[in-house]
Amino acid sequence: MTATLDWNHADAATAAILNDSSSAPRADKMAGWLSTLLPQHDDELTVALLMDDRPSPVPATTDPASDAFAATPTEMPSPIRSLRRKESPITTFGRITGLLKWEGMVTNVSDGEFTAELTPMNHDGPIVEADFSFDRLPDSEHAEIHTGTNFYLAVREVAGLRGGKHFTSSIKLRRLGTWSQDTVDSIRERAAKAYRESLKYIE
Amino acid sequence: MHVGDHKWLMIDSCKEQRTGRNIALDYLRSIGVDIAKDIVMIVATHAHDDHFAGIADAFEQATAAKMVVSSALSREEFFVLMESDAVAASQYGLRRSAYSEYRRILQISERRFKSGDGGTIPMIKAMESRQLLQMPGSATAPPVDVWSLSPSDMSVQRAIAKFVTACPVADFPVRRSHLDPNDCSVVVRVRIGDIVILLGGDLPTGPAGCGWEAILASATHTPASVIKVPHHGSVTSHHDRMWDELLDEQPVALIAPFRAGRKRLPAKDDLERIVLKTPHVYLTARTDLPAKRRAVTATADRVASLAREVRDPWGDVGQVTARRKPAASEWTVWTRPPSYRIGHSVGRRR
């Protein structure tokens, strides 16, 4: 989920942090800047910052809603160059401190949703059933969901900058490749042989 | 099913999901049954986990038993599906499927055939109107005969057509086929003296030439006094003529609920429909989901952003026992919790 940035305070907050000459660690200064811009969320919160140590010539009259901010040279290594737009893919800012994975197998598909059995892969836990909306998958993957489809479900625990904890989760379909002609031929040959043998012991 | 003289039939199998134990075998051992010698026949009505899980283990241990499977599964097209499933599972590390259970059954049968005298065929194909077993009576037990009433020829032909479309094709994606085996489910009719029991598998109602439609179109049968209600009481397997023509008036109806998936069976209206047919309706467990364990709640919290209704549908396994002496006029039925009789509290006798 993407946080909604409070652009109204961007200018003042940015100026404040750029003029902050305290000896506080850079990360804490950044965290302070973020906290004035971002409303608190209880669920997952992901923001990306692009930072580098090269000076960047940012026009002083840049609109706060654009990708760049007005900046003046400071003793900080570099100003923030841009913030990703909320519809852009974003990466987690923080440290992954835990990962839970399940293997899912679709057991039923109905209008707009599917049911799957989830088996823990890397931790102790019960096998459960759960329902998933097709909205959770890209449109291009909907046609691949049918009974028997396998997928991975991952939940990552992310330690935030200011000590909080967030979770991000994802579903990834398992793609099993395509059949080669050689494999298909050998399958048919083995099946035919097994079938002929079975005629002796099945009446 | 005890058929007299310490001989048993086993219709389907299941595993207790939380422990992985084959509870049918555990029960039989607990009452002193010698699994190796006393089970004379095992019938796999169809390859859904709630009927099929653990059946290969049972067959392996029941060394005197003949194995009965739907005739649809003895076709070459099905062998292609089995083989492709094995390749996909091996190549991609997939979990075991019903196909792997069936492959084991075939391996056990082949081994037994080769190690035996060559005259004893360990597997039988079930199809409409086929006698599977006949036991002459004795001083202590009446004669027994066991018949399969399905699948019909048309059901098998339809199944083969589906198998063909699911077979692997070069340059197409590798997929596990997941065909619905209910259409070729085996319905078993057991006659012990004058007593008839009908086990409905998960056979659906039709279409014409298939399912219960096909059974009712064939020869008439002596009505049964006990019915294992097909497909967990679902309306998709309900046929009024089955109740009117194949069963006694007010038979003992046994239902095993199905809790996995979104639609739990039997639904409320299924039970209302069935109790209109007979007041003697027994369920082996409640249809409601069991109370959530802490571990399930923790899982639900973790995956809440993606998944809804996280649940553990597997609860404790109940048991319904129906007993009748050959000369008796009615059945005596016991329930062991969580099984119960509709309209009665747990534990009462009929």
Image (cartoon, coloured by chain):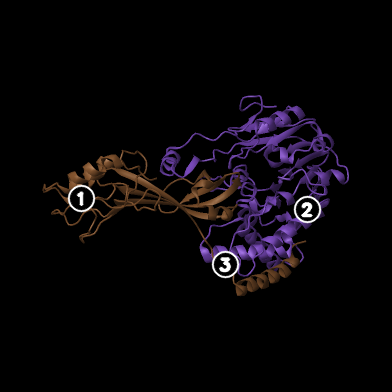
Chain colours: A brown, B purple
Q: Is residue B236 visible?
A: yes
Helix, strand or loop at disc 3?
A: loop
Tell which of B95 and A24 is nearer to you.
A24
Up-down relation of residue B179 to residue B222 (above or below): below
| Residue highlighted by disc 2 | B155
In the picture, the quarter occupied by the N terminus of chain B is top right
Give amino acid for label 2: Ser
In the picture, the quarter occupied by the C terminus of chain B is top right
The chain carrying label 1 is A
Helix, strand or loop at disc 2?
A: helix
How far separated are the C-alphas under marks 2 and 3?
31 Å
| Residue highlighted by disc 1 | A27
For label 2, count other residues whose C-alpha is less than 10 Å away and answer few (under 14), some (14-19) or many (20+).
many
Residue at figure coordinates x 80%, y 42% from the top left? B192
Up-down relation of residue B73 to residue A185 (above or below): above
**Nearest-to-viewer mark from 2 and 1:** 1
The chain carrying label 3 is A
| Residue highlighted by disc 3 | A178
